[in-house]
Image (tube, rainbow, N blue to C red):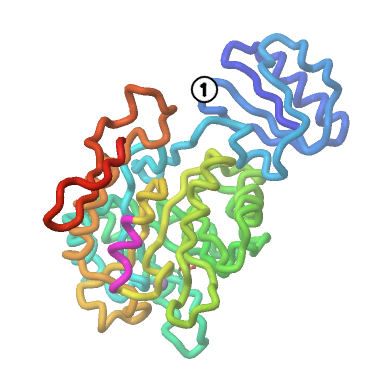
Amino acid sequence: MLITISSEAPQSTRAAILLAAAEGGLRTQTMTNGRGGEVVAIVGSLPPLLGELPGVESIQSVHKPYMLASLEARASSIVDAGGVGIGGGTPVIMAGPCSIESRETLVDLARAVKAAGATMLRGGAFKPRSSPYSFQGLGLEGLQHLAAAREATGLAVVTEVMEPDQVEVVAGYADMLQVGSRNMANFPLLKRIGQCTTPVLLKRGFSATLEELLMSAEYIMANGNPNVVLCERGIRGFDAAFRFNLDLNIVPAIKEVSHLPVIVDPSHGTGRRSLVKRMAMAGLASGADGLMVEVHPDPERALSDGYQTITPDELAHIHRHGLALHEVLAGLDDELDETTIPAHEPVRITALGEEPAVVLSA
Ligand code: PEP
Ligand code: MN
């Protein structure tokens, strides 16, 4: 059940709802509703009489199973990650190496991605590698390099956490915790992350459905952390030509049912450097609130995922065109009326050397 209370509701209303839930043995979680009020999510049902308390705006007993993540609970969220607002505005670009390699290379790269338009630095210190024999990341030392890069550039930093017991230490360095694709359904990890307030980037499992992704977000939110951003990073397809397929359907589909910001990762989503630029544009066109891109000064030499990594110059190109695209598409989701339909010339189809044969009017 979702109960929305207005900003003018007296404290006694909130207290009465929480008390009624506690007496019924029902779990509750509250969060702001983006309109100045508050929403109380209750695992179970309370008597509808509560609707008569002053300041209760609505009671919804029928709602999505991911009640806190759903658009039924609140208006679109903007998640603040180290001063960077994700959602509802200019697209955010998170960029950096797949793995942190050394302090010097990370600090230099942080400067380069900042100059190329990135507002957040990414980089893995604890790496979930497919092979146990591959480079596993620098661990704690990598986190320290990340902190040095933030210090040098002012960029907010996002990095992966793989185990519940690492959450505290990683949150001590990061502005945003990344949950990787392989851990999207690691429920003990999600619960632990829910107990802190550090924003979370939750990557979609590569065989997870939209509902499973939102239920994983719900795990984090139900445990007290509402600061979740979702990330589409490609799903497994049948075609061996691609490591993964970027499933951009999910971006506008999430926006129809959830208030959470969504970003797109065209690096893991394609597995191929040459496809990153176009799919980054496609990601923005799909309505994403930002991009996560793997960048390295010398991608061929990167210690991991070099084949899908681009250079800072290529990132600058994506940034420039991405902002232009964002501007062109502003208003695409507005209600259609005559003033928002752009006027355009009739299309003329003319055979070579002939007078116009067919005129399709606009
Ligand atoms: C990464 O971002 O480097 C990463 C490992 O991503 P994913 O979990 O999406 O594979
Ligand atoms: Mn990677």
For this view, does 67 lie left or right of residue 156? right
Residue 259 appears at what percent x and percent y? 53, 38
The span shown in magenta is 274-281
Q: Residue 180 in the image: x percent, y percent?
A: 51, 65
Q: Main secondary structure of the magenta part?
A: helix
Residue beneath the point at 29% across and 43% down: 326
Q: Could you say whether the residue bearing mark 1 is in a helix, strand or loop?
A: loop
Q: Which residue is painted at 62% across and 59% down in the image?
A: 209
Q: In the rendered image, is residue 199 in sight?
A: no
Q: Is residue 280 magenta?
A: yes
| Residue 208 drawn above or below residue 33 | below
Indicate whether 62 appears above or below 122: above
From the image, tell me which residue sits under label 1.
Answer: 35
Of residues 138 and 54, the one nearer the viewer is: 54
Q: Is residue 290 left or right of residue 131?
A: left
Q: Residue furthest left?
A: 353
Dot 1 amino acid type? Arg
Q: How many marks?
A: 1
